[in-house]
Image (cartoon, rainbow, N blue to C red):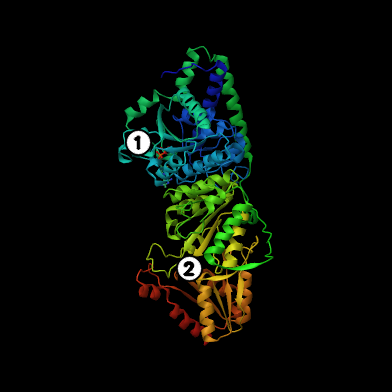
């Protein structure tokens, strides 16, 4: 292997050697411990260390890296204390994730690392968001996202590169091309000859290096980063390398031709660099021994400490508490004049006031800039707040949710407008696995609001009409609000932006322009997690939200019955106390929602009522939801699907029970 030492002092070369040897020595020790059954599953980076080490050493210490499962050299390169790192790998309480996450699935802001979720690709869009934050603040920094060759087949890879290219974000996308994705060889994974060929497709510079050559990786990344700090733009960096061990230790390498292993063994990044340094007279025997002994002592001491640490004793309270970032809402009371606004205008008004209150809030969504969004909620916002903060996005829902998370890592607040709630399916993974779980996993909050224009009754068919709040209701870590009137919509939206936790904010499209009401003009917030009793009554309680509130009000008025109507307003967490108190009073409960019935939010509420206030009930808890079918297009079919008449009959049944 050829090394080019020009531009490096002997001390710099020794520093790089020191950084390269540490992850190898840790892994060699891990292999021994694995055989002794003392450590668990392990994704080896042996043979690929020059990439993680070269990249990390080439960056400034405060530039973020989004590493993957084989990138131990990133973590050691950022000088993470080995005892905390080993405790993390061992699932011990003093690890970065307090035993909640495995291996490298964690991050640390102190070390400027955002760790992966298992899904690989979502990492890359977080790099976009962090790079966007750098660019907005004019910080002159780069972010680095890692991908394996297998991971490039994921849609997330494409979306992240596309967004970075369109927005000229300073991200280095490092592809570690090691020839296999688990057991699948390259020819069954992709058809391109080399990844740099993809650069032109994204309108992006692409560079290929020998990933086993530490100096080549280091020099290339250093030069790229220097140039990108001045002239922000993304670059695709393909590093050719090889995975010398199994996908994970237990799986072996039987499927890899022996000759391939032998060829690549000749290119071992550690031994080649070491021998070259020795040949150049840079690394003397005593210096080599000193560096290795230093690492060995540090590894042994850290391991000893971690093995001595007792297993975790579960304590319930912090496990539940840490699902959300701490936030104590201080409700801002509405004062002063009100004016009559439609739901759509109240949301727009709230969003505008949020932009004024939070200069670090960035809005993203398809067609939301000059066009004002398909529902015109952000009309005029570009003129008021500029294009940096009101951003049209490509059709890349997953990458935009991921970018929002990256912005949050850098202390921004982000809102993403889903053009229609239905399209959240393509950003689903980022929401339920990244946004929702990150605080529990390693304490990083996700200050993101995803606005969701939702609901049926507009003759728009199966993919522009769905109610999908229940998909998220089942996901700890999210907050879900769903206002039924303009005043609540503005107040809840403003409350959501004050909270560092991730929100899904549902807005019913059919109500945008059909529902109006008085809305305070000044800034105010509505309490999150608090239901409203919109009508008092004695005979039964209807628990509902969104469009259901209007169906309930109409039905009860028609029937002339004394029925209490509760508008949940927040679905996660929902207001058990108000619901249970009302049902205790009325003795009958009806849960109503527009969403399809089976597995809907009503099922959970009905179950809690049955469990908690059974002795007060005079009738079974009843529910109404839409038919368990997709939302049909033709209006008569859609009306049958929603079944407002069925709801009224069912309510009558309850009242006469
Ligand atoms: C979305 C998703 N699908 C499948 C997997 C299982 N899986 C984990 S790593 C891996 C192979 C990844 O290959 P590559 O991206 O080339 O990285 P390498 O492991 O070679 O470093 C697979 C299939 C996963 N983690 N996530």
Image position of 378 with respect to 607: above or below: above
Which of discs 1 and 2 lies nearer the camera? The answer is 2
Q: Dot 2: few (<14), some (14–19), or many (≥20) neighbours within 10 Å?
A: many
* Residue placed most toward the observer, 293 or 475: 475
* Whether label 1 touches label 2, CB < 8 Å: no
Q: What is the quadrant of the N terminus in the image? A: top left
Tell me the residue that label 1 is attached to: 254
Image position of 272 with respect to 152: above or below: above
- Residue 281's spot in the image, x, y percent? 51, 11
**Residue appearing at x 61%, y 29% in the figure:** 298
Q: Please, what secondary structure does the residue beneath circle 1 have?
A: loop
Numbered tag placed on residue 430 in the rendering: none
Decide if residue 488 is on the left or right side of residue 1. Answer: right
Q: How many marks?
A: 2
Q: What distance separates the C-alpha of mark 1 from that of mark 2?
A: 47 Å
- Residue 326's spot in the image, x, y percent? 65, 53
Tell me the residue that label 2 is attached to: 600
Ligand 1 position by quadrant? top left
- Residue 629's spot in the image, x, y percent? 38, 69
Decide if residue 283 is on the left or right side of residue 460. Answer: right
Q: Does residue 41 appear anywhere in the picture?
A: yes
- Residue 20's spot in the image, x, y percent? 52, 26
**Residue appearing at x 63%, y 72% in the figure:** 578
* Residue placed most toward the observer, 368 or 203: 368
Q: Dot 1: few (<14), some (14–19), or many (≥20) neighbours within 10 Å?
A: few
Decide if residue 50 is on the left or right side of residue 565. Answer: left
Q: Which of disc 2 and disc 1 is earlier in sequence?
A: 1
Q: Does residue 436 appear anywhere in the picture?
A: no
């Amino acid at each position: 292997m050829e090394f080019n030492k020009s531009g490096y002092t002997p001390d710099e070369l020794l520093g790089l050697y020191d950084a390269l040897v540490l992850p190898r020595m840790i892994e060699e020790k891990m292999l021994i411990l694995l055989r002794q059954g003392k450590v668990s599953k392990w994704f080896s980076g042996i043979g690929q260390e020059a990439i993680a080490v070269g990249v990390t050493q080439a960056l400034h210490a405060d530039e973020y890296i989004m590493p993957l499962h084989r990138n131990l050299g990133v973590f050691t390169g950022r000088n993470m204390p080995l005892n905390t790192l080993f405790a993390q790998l061992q699932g011990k309480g003093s690890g970065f994730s307090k035993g909640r996450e495995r291996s490298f699935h964690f991050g640390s802001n102190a070390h400027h690392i955002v760790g992966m979720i298992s899904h690989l690709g979502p990492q890359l869009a977080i790099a976009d968001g962090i790079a966007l934050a750098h660019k907005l603040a004019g910080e002159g920094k780069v972010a680095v996202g890692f991908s394996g060759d297998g991971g490039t087949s994921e849609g997330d890879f494409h979306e992240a590169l596309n967004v970075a290219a369109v927005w000229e974000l300073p991200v280095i996308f490092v592809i570690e091309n090691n020839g296999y994705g688990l057991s699948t060889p390259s020819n069954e994974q992709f058809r391109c000859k080399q990844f740099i060929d993809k650069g032109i497709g994204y309108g992006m510079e692409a560079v290929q290096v020998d990933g086993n050559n530490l100096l080549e990786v280091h020099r290339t990344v250093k030069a790229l980063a220097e140039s990108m700090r001045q002239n922000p733009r993304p670059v695709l960096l393909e590093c050719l390398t090889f995975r010398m061990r199994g996908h994970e230790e237990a799986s072996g390498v039987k499927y890899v031709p022996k000759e391939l292993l032998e060829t690549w063994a000749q290119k071992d990044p550690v031994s080649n660099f070491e021998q070259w340094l020795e040949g150049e007279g840079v690394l003397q025997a005593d210096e080599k021994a000193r560096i290795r002994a230093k690492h060995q002592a540090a590894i042994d001491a850290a391991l000893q400490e971690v093995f001595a640490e007792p297993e975790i004793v579960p304590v319930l309270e912090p496990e539940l508490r840490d699902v959300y970032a701490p936030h104590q809402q201080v409700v801002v009371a509405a004062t002063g004049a009100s004016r009559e606004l439609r739901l759509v205008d109240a949301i727009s008004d709230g969003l505008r006031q949020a932009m004024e209150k939070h200069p670090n809030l960035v809005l993203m969504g398809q067609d939301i800039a000059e066009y004002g969004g398909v529902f015109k909620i952000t009309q005029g916002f570009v003129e008021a707040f500029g294009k940096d903060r009101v951003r049209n996005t490509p059709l890349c829902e997953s990458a935009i949710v991921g970018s929002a998370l990256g912005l949050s890592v850098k202390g921004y607040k982000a809102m993403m407008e889903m053009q229609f709630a239905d399209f959240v399916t393509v950003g689903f993974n980022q929401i339920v696995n990244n946004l929702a779980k990150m605080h529990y996993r390693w304490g990083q909050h996700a200050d993101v609001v995803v606005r969701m224009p939702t609901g049926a009754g507009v003759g728009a068919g199966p993919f522009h009409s769905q109610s999908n709040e229940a998909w998220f209701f089942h996901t700890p870590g999210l907050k879900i609000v769903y206002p039924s009137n303009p005043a609540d919509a503005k107040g809840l939206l403003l409350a959501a932006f004050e909270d560092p936790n991730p929100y899904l904010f549902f807005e019913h499209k059919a109500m945008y322009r059909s529902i109006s009401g008085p809305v305070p003009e000044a800034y105010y917030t509505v309490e999150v997690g608090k239901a409203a009793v919109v009508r008092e009554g004695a005979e039964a309680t209807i628990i509902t939200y969104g469009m259901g509130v209007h169906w309930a009000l109409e039905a009860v008025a028609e029937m002339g019955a004394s029925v209490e109507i509760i508008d949940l307003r927040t679905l996660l967490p929902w207001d058990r106390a108000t619901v249970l108190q009302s049902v205790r009073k009325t003795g009958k409960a009806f849960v109503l929602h527009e969403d399809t019935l089976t597995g809907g939010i009503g099922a959970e509420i009905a179950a809690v009522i049955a469990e908690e206030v059974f002795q007060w009930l005079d009738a079974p808890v009843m529910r109404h939801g839409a038919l368990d079918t997709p939302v049909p297009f033709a209006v008569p079919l859609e009306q049958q699907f929603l079944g407002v008449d069925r709801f009224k009959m069912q309510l009558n049944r309850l009242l006469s029970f």
